[in-house]
Amino acid sequence: MLVIVGYLVVIGAVFGGYILVGGHLGALYQPSEFLIIAGAGVGAFIVGNNAKAIKSTMKSFPLLFRGSKYNKSLYMDLMALLFRLMAKARQHGMLVLEFDIDTPNESEIFKLYPRILADKQLVDFITDYLRLMIGGNMNAFEIESLMDEEIETYEHECEIPAASLGQVGDSLPAFGIVAAVMGVVHALASADRSAVELGALIAQAMVGTFLGILLAYGFISPLASLLRQKKDETTKMMQCIKITLLSSIHGYAPQIAVEFGRKTLFSAERPSFSELEAHVRLAREPVKQPVEEDA
């Protein structure tokens, strides 16, 4: 929604200001200039990316028009979930988490936090490393190194669509100049026309430069920045999980481990100590465990 609002502000400011100085919108309607700039931009995008990068960029477009799901409430749910898992393991041993790890959709603990459960990436990140903690025979430094590698890989994958859009945005002003030069060439080739007609042709050519710059800095480049911000939000969730689980491995109590995780969050979404403590206090309520029926 904010993307659409931003676009409306850009369009209103640019074209509204143009109208206020007496400009006529009809003079800016140059489909051929738009075709040259947009077509060249799309072509350059295809040339500069492989099929995997193109597919990844296309998949990222729906995310741009959705609001952020990572807020304070979701962070507190995440830490409450981690607290329940660590408290259960601390009380009964790590092996008791096997059912929750293998079947998170059936786990009574995970089902208490449906928004976390709906995020497959986060659930996989949690369960994979809990599984390694149970049976991987790995120390804390090895698990931390593996977590860092996975987070770095995720950041690299997310950077591909952002970088692709950024490159297209950077190229559009140049393609606008190409369109303008072609328009000027057309005008000069029509030097036998009247001064009024030549003036109109040159004005049409200048629209190319205008469109290239407007599309680049008003529409495309901001999308690349937005994708990077969304990547940072997901990365922060993964870092919170990483710090919390590592604190548990080092022997800290679940209450202290989630406090370590809280400190990694961005200040805008970070709950206060008292807010987290109150939320965790609710998480201390016992969860019914699945009872296996005797054969």
Image: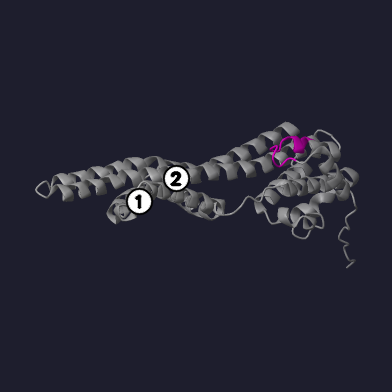
Residue in the foreground of this view, choosing between 42 and 294: 42
In the picture, the quarter occupied by the N terminus is bottom right
Mark 1 is on which residue type?
Answer: Ala
Residue in the picture at 18% in, 44% down: 185
Q: Is residue 295 left or right of residue 102?
A: right
Q: How is the image coloured?
A: one colour
Residue ranking furthest to the top? 141
In the picture, the quarter occupied by the C terminus is bottom right
Mark 2 is on which residue type?
Answer: Gly
Helix, strand, or loop for circle 1? helix
Mark 1 closeness class: few <14, some 14–19, many ≥20 residues within 10 Å: some
Disc 1 target residue: 38
Quick check: marks 2 and 1 in contact, CB under 8 Å?
Answer: no
Residue 182 placement (x, y as % from top left):
22, 45
Sequence-earlier tag: 2 or 1 = 1
Nearer the observer: mark 2 or 1; the answer is 2
**Residue 214 magenta-drawn?**
no
With respect to residue 292, does 231 lie above or below?
above
Residue 193 placement (x, y as % from top left):
11, 50
Give the spatial CA distance, label 2 vs label 1.
14 Å
Q: Is residue 1 left or right of residue 85?
A: left
Residue in the foreground of this view, choosing between 287 and 289: 287
The dot on residue 68 is none
Q: Can the viewer see residue 194 in this picture?
A: yes
Q: Is residue 172 left or right of residue 287?
A: left
Residue in the picture at 70% in, 51% down: 123
Residue 91 placement (x, y as % from top left):
90, 45
Disc 2 target residue: 218
Residue 116 placement (x, y as % from top left):
72, 53
Name the dominant secondary structure of the magenta segment.
Answer: loop
Q: Which residues are magenta?
A: 260-270
Residue in the picture at 87% in, 63% down: 292
